[in-house]
Image (cartoon, grey):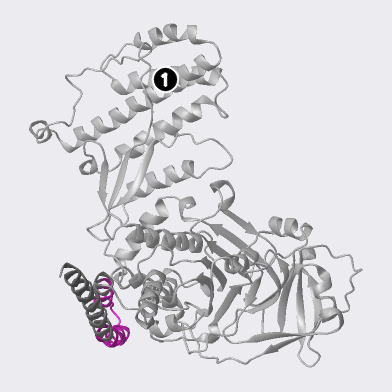
Amino acid sequence: MELLFAWIDSYKNIKRLGFNFSNYQDVSLEFGENSSIVKVRINEARENFKIFGPRIKSMTGIIGKNGSGKSNILELIGMSMEQRRLESINSSSYFLLYKYSPTKYVIEGADFKLVQNILNDISINSGYQNPYSFTVRYNREEGVFKKLEFLQEDTKKIKSLEILTANHQGYSSHVARFSEASIMFQRIVLQPKNIGVYPKYKMLIDFNKHNDIGNQTFQAKDRVYLHIRPNLKYTAHGKYDLELKVNKSLKIIFKTNDMDYALSPYEKKKNWISSLTEKYIFFAWESLTDHLIKYDEEHKIPTLKERIENIPNNGNVWGYYSEILNLLMGELDRLNNFWVDKDEYYNAFDELTLLLFSLPSKAFTQDTLKILVGDVEEESISNLLRRLDKEYLKTDSPDLLNRILKVEFLPFSSGEEAFLNLFSTLYYGITINKNHERKTLLILLDEPDQFMHPEWCRLFIWQLTTFLKQTCDYYNYQVIFTTHSPFLVSDLPNSYVITLDKNQDTGECIALPKISTQTFASNIHTLLADKFFMDTTTGEFAFQTINKVIKRLNNPRPLSVKKRRDISSIIGVIGEPIIQNRLIEMFNAKVPNDREQRLRELKDQQRKIQSEIDKIESEDV
């Protein structure tokens, strides 16, 4: 199934505009009285050459200035059913047209009045509620549809289209990560911060295996490390500081090179996990004392402190830690601080400890777990990252591990991190529900090139198409993205590009004609010169400075010596040779005239001075 067309009668700043999304079919509407839609024309008007390969059905770029409505279009297409119900209450009015098979189409939307004239045998009084979905058959001669099924009544629930939205920014994690299966569609909304760490690790492994993607941007193999370090924050209370019975002579501490060479990797691992456990104990102790103070039970703290400090350490440090944690968890549970049983917290930490012990001993350093990312996935690392993701991404129950560890990939620039975040988000979304029926995945990308270096923007479409072909072979793809960048547009024919602007008075979206030049393989400077992207390809400060120089050179008034030096300096740093040479000509033409004028002024002053001298001398005589 493929999204062909969207008619948006009213949604946010978009009013009565239609948008084509297929690279091979054009949809147009005919209007009757009261501007109602009376016919739909579906034309095989575009070339049938699949420029991106057989599995990428179409790719559409939406370009527009800030506030023009680009993101609103993607938002409407990717909206969940619950959001559609709310928007229909808020008077949003639209319909989306999908091609389901050579003879069948699907229409979904809100405000049934929009489509009542193009659906045979259905009236506005048929009892259908917003939002609605129909399968229909198209009558090309009459330009109307015949309803086949009302999808909300269909019990088969055939999912023929998955819609994946990947955003850089958005809402909180509680609403930004969901997967909704409806009758004909599955919508998945993701943000990089809400997919977890494991997909990024897996993505790097795959990049290192398939170097034709990674080598074009950054080489991760044997360069990028997985860094894991404690992330618990706590402060000392002074009189309530807890003293643990840990044998300092046996506790291995990484402080000097002299000690480090004598330690076995396994001893380093034990010490690292022991140190993390102590931090967790102090963190839990602080949480307990804070709650006792808050609920006027501070008088109980000394007794609890004495009980903990009297727990014996008989040489089994892990048993010692276990007793302390059980006591702390029990007291916190008594204060009703837990939403779940205290044993679940303890078991989660115990499981984390076992996962850490399963990691390679060589990875443990003084403060950080440091693991080189190669091209082979290590099961122990994957198990740990999946367990952390399971807790950190929860939205309906507490995090049992209290974000005990911070996980990062280093060293990464902000551009590299943006690249990894985007592609790992896509990887997660594509593989979250593997489908072997070759249905379509509609991918919605809102400014995917944000934060990327211009060279990476230039490579992005190639990277994306290569990635989609390599990641899995069980999907066909349709891609719709928004951008400000001419780099992305230069990889699309201009018929694949939707151009938007904003009415500065009303704020409403304006659909512009196609870019005048052919965009595919077009020179970036040629695209930038198009008025859509920029009024001028020069920075505004430089543009205004050059205009001031031109006005000053055209002014008949003479230039002072300082002004000449200033103008000469500005002309000297201009990088565009045509502009620079023209200003040099203007300057040379202006300065000789100024010299002659100044000479006349000086001679006139000389005559006046001489006249004064002669007058004084004659008075003396």
Q: Nearer the viewer, residue 231 or 503?
A: 503
Q: Nearer the viewer, residue 612 or 70?
A: 612
Q: Nearer the viewer, residue 595 or 207?
A: 595
Residue at 45% across / 19% down in the picture? 328
Q: Main secondary structure of the magenta part?
A: helix
Where does residue 576 sit, x and y in percent of width and height?
30, 82
Which quadrant is the N terminus positioned in? bottom right
Q: Is residue 351 visible?
A: yes
Residue 568 magenta-drawn?
A: yes
Which quadrant is the C terminus positioned in? bottom left
Residue 430 magenta-drawn?
A: no
Residue at 65% across / 65% down in the picture? 76
Where does residue 481 sit, x and y in percent of width and height?
52, 71
Residue at 55% across / 18% down in the picture? 335
* Label 1 element class: helix
Residue at 20% across / 69% down in the picture? 619
Residue at the far front: name it. 621
Residue at the far right: name it. 125
The magenta stretch is 566-592
In the picture shown, does residue 307 fall above or below 119? above
Where does residue 62 sit, x and y in percent of width and height?
55, 74
Circle 1 residue: 285
